[in-house]
Image: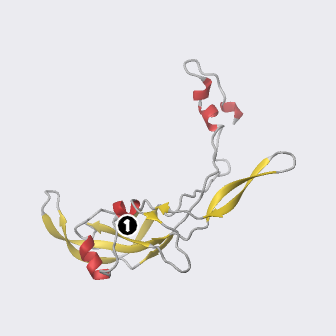
Amino acid sequence: QPSLEWQPHYTTKSETLWSQARQAVFRRSIWALELGIKPLRMIKANVPDSNGNLVSRDVWYLVYYVKNNGRHLNPKPQQDAQGHVTFTTENVNHTVRFFPTFVLQCHDVGQAYLDQVLPGAIPQIRQREDPRRPLRDSVKMSDASIPVSTEFEDRSVWGVATWVGVDPRTDFFSVYIQGLTNAYRWQDVEGAFQP
């Protein structure tokens, strides 16, 4: 939008939004992870209350894995005969870090709950699900670099999302997960932008 260009009186022209935005590059590597989940379950676990005392509470939990299948997209410049540069994509393999956000949306009671880190509940959940498989909470999951899996070697990383204080009347819910990709989609709704 060239009409956004203006000459400021108290700062340099390079500090204006127009000057900064015209240098923005939107081409970047795009990656995505595969997600697999077990059904949502409950367990009684000892968790700290607001005073730091351990109390037995109902913990809702979701055991999941994330897998890096590789073949991520990387921008690759190409120059035509007239010297114009266009971009295509090429497949690359690299490790990825997953910074998860889990939200349990209870539709019938009108409440939403953010995943809580409950280190005391993880050993009980692990013992119940699979004692041989380490489970990571959301903080420990974000610390892991997820290597690329191959058809011969599965390098999935397993984690668990936990919630306490969920309304026991809940019968209809959804789990929303963010962080499985760094892709986004431009949406220019017709008539929404007004200069």
Q: How is the image coloured?
A: secondary structure
Q: Amino acid at mark 1?
A: Leu
Q: Quadrant of residue 170?
A: bottom left
Could you say where residue 116 lies in the image, as x and y percent from the top left? 30, 62
Image quadrant where residue 193 sits: top right
Q: Is residue 11 in sight in this rendering? A: yes
User: Vertical placement of 23 versus 152: above or below?
Assistant: above
**What x and y, as percent, mark residue 143?**
39, 59
- Residue at the extreme front: 152
Q: Which residue is mark 1?
A: 104
Q: Measuring 36% from the left and 77% from the top, which residue is drawn there?
A: 40
Point 62% across, 37% down: residue: 21
Above-or-below relation of 114 to 18: below
Is 155 situated left or right of 137 in this image?
right
Question: Quadrant where the N terminus lies?
Answer: top right
> In the image, 95: left or right of 126?
right
Q: Secondary structure at mark 1?
A: strand
Image quarter for residue 62? bottom left
Residue at the image point whose x is 37% and y is 74% from the top: 63
Residue sitting nearer the eye, 187 or 34 = 34
The answer to whether residue 113 is visible is: no
Q: Is residue 35 left or right of residue 26?
A: left
Name the quarter where the C terminus is drawn. top right
Labels in figure, total: 1
Q: Nearer the viewer, residue 12 or 83?
A: 83
Q: In the image, residue 34 lies at what x, y percent?
A: 51, 71
Callout 1: 10 Å neighbours few (<14), some, many (20+)? many
Name the outermost residue toward the top. Answer: 9
- Residue for point 56% across, 79% down: 151
